[in-house]
Image: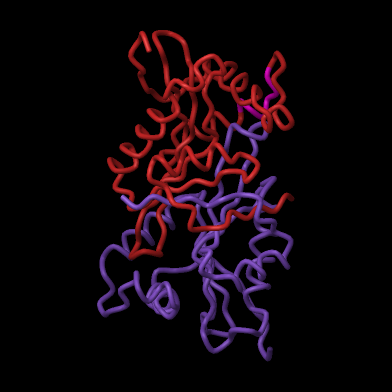
Chain colours: A purple, B red
Amino acid sequence: MDAKLEFRMAEENDLDRIVEMLADDLLGSQRELYVRPLPQSYLDAFKSIASDPNNELIVACEGNEVIGVQQITFTPYITHQGGWRATIEGVRTSARVRGKGIGTEMIRWAINRAEERGCHLVQLTTDKKRPNALRFYEKLGFTATHEGLKLKL
Amino acid sequence: MDAKLEFRMAEENDLDRIVEMLADDLLGSQRELYVRPLPQSYLDAFKSIASDPNNELIVACEGNEVIGVQQITFTPYITHQGGWRATIEGVRTSARVRGKGIGTEMIRWAINRAEERGCHLVQLTTDKKRPNALRFYEKLGFTATHEGLKLKL
């Protein structure tokens, strides 16, 4: 890498780039709608996230260019003696930087952020159709102790 | 069942009973601390949940008795065109009512609540050490499409 990777909260004018990255993916291409103007639902979600102190939409930047995105949700639970958890979701990097360790830096950043926020656990689910993603997270210290169940409404 | 099952938001004076149920479980007994007075961390978590409009700690009651608990977290995401998800966690029923369909009614209630809140997906993770729980959720329509990864901090 030439430039240092920097992390910051996403701003509204990053949203176009974020949706572009989410749509540029085997699974994402089937469920996102990257058109201009962006569907209002993306803007509404962005505003809900930005106004919620327990949700952080984080972008990774190389210089002025946004090359990665992830969302971290901090949740208080009664379980584990009232412990907070961090949940990572929607992790994507720009296609042109894949394989350069950007994803690893992003997840390490999220783990540090979870520690700063006093969480006892970081969790995420990964689609069983992405075996490389499972290995990627296992290398970072995660263990696949749970089944991740989904029900579409 | 004799009495009709009713659902409501948990109140602070339900907390003792909630922790009692969480601790009365193979995995829960190893990680909860059900003593009197309750550790302050449980009260702090309760207050964080109660003051967060995107978290609902729900109790199931038979008459005046609390016989079940679950937490539902509503999260706005950019993914899926800015879709909201509901995450169910910390589901427990009283030992004396297990096998009577209370859990099924609880999860159905949570699914309805997720629909009311405009979610497109309900999700949860279940420990691979609980094969019965997996079958329980599959019967309710969930599919185990994802691996659930955890990293303890």
Span of residues in magenta: B38-43
Give whichever of B111, B99 is nearer the camera.
B99
Q: Quadrant of residue B64?
A: top left
Residue at 64% in and 22% down: B24
User: Quick one: A9 or B74, which is closer to the camera?
Assistant: B74
In the image, is residue B120 part of the stretch drawn in magenta?
Answer: no
B135 on left or right of B108: right
Up-down relation of residue A84 to residue B76 (above or below): above
Q: Nearer the viewer, residue A48 or A125?
A: A125
Image x and y of residue B58, in percent: 44, 28
Q: How far from the left and from the top, in percent, is residue A28?
A: 41, 73
Picture residue at 48% right of the left edge, 15% below the top: B66
Q: Give the answer, above or below, for where A2 lies relative to A59.
A: below
Whole-percent x, y for residue A59 in the image: 53, 71
Where, quadrant-wise, is the N terminus of chain A in this rendering? Answer: bottom right
- Is B42 on the left-hand or right-hand side of B5? right
For the point 26% across and 80% down, which residue is it? A36
